[in-house]
Image (cartoon, rainbow, N blue to C red):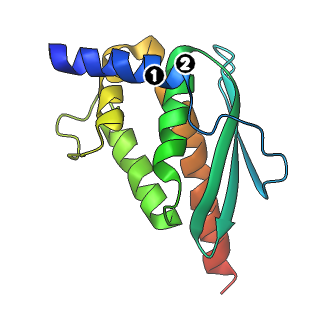
Amino acid sequence: MTEKLKQLYKTVILKHNKAPYHYEKQLSAPHHIAAYNPLCGDQFNVYLNLDNGKIKQIHFHGYGCAISKASTSVLVKNLENKSIEEALELCGVFKQLTDPNEKQPKRIDIEELKAFETAKNFPSRLSCATLSWEAIQNYLEKEVEKNSSDK
């Protein structure tokens, strides 16, 4: 792991843990996604407002370690105003980026996402980094299935 990547990881986690993006309850949002890790107790709710297959608004609230909070903040920041397809693609890239078995992850130009590539070197922290990403990906995949079966 390069020193530059280690520093990016620290910087992103500190920044997003201290001042998370759209960190507030949005109980009126039509879609609520729960991300919970029973092993460590990290628990976040992601609030979505979807309109015509696009994420119009996204917020989160909850508690967890600095890594899970920062990762969820980066997720929210990067999925806002994306189509469901774009969001699923980004979730797939994040999953590949943090997969310890992936030798050649897809290149990504979003620095904040790159920072979490480091998490794959810390197996005990990996689930913290991927918690909300996996919850959103699963939820959006079900939305796509539901919408395609309605047609």
The C terminus - image quarter: bottom right
Q: Nearest the camera: 93 or 110?
A: 110
Q: Nearest the camera: 136 or 82?
A: 82
Q: Are marks 2 and 1 in contact (CB under 8 Å)?
A: yes
Residue located 22% across and 21% down the image? 5
Distance Cα–Cα, label 2 vs label 1: 5 Å
Residue located 40% across and 15% down the image? 123
Q: Is residue 53 left or right of residue 25?
A: left
Q: Is residue 13 left or right of residue 96?
A: right
Q: Which quadrant of the figure has residue 121? A: top left
Q: Residues within 10 Å of mark 1 (few under 14, many from 20)?
A: some
Q: Is residue 104 left or right of residue 124?
A: left
Q: Residue 4: image x %, image y %?
A: 18, 19
The N terminus - image quarter: top left
SS under mark 2: helix
Residue, far front: 19
Q: Which quadrant of the figure has residue 54? A: bottom right
**Residue topped by disc 1:** 15
Q: Residue 147: image x %, image y %?
A: 65, 75
Q: Which mark is residue 112?
A: none
Residue 71 versus residue 82 in the image, above or below: above
Residue 3 versus residue 136 in the image, above or below: above
Residue located 46% across and 66% down the image? 85
SS under mark 1: helix
**Residue topped by disc 2:** 18
The answer to whether residue 1 is visible is no
Mark 1: which amino acid? Lys
Residue located 57% across and 36% down the image? 132
Mark 2: which amino acid? Lys
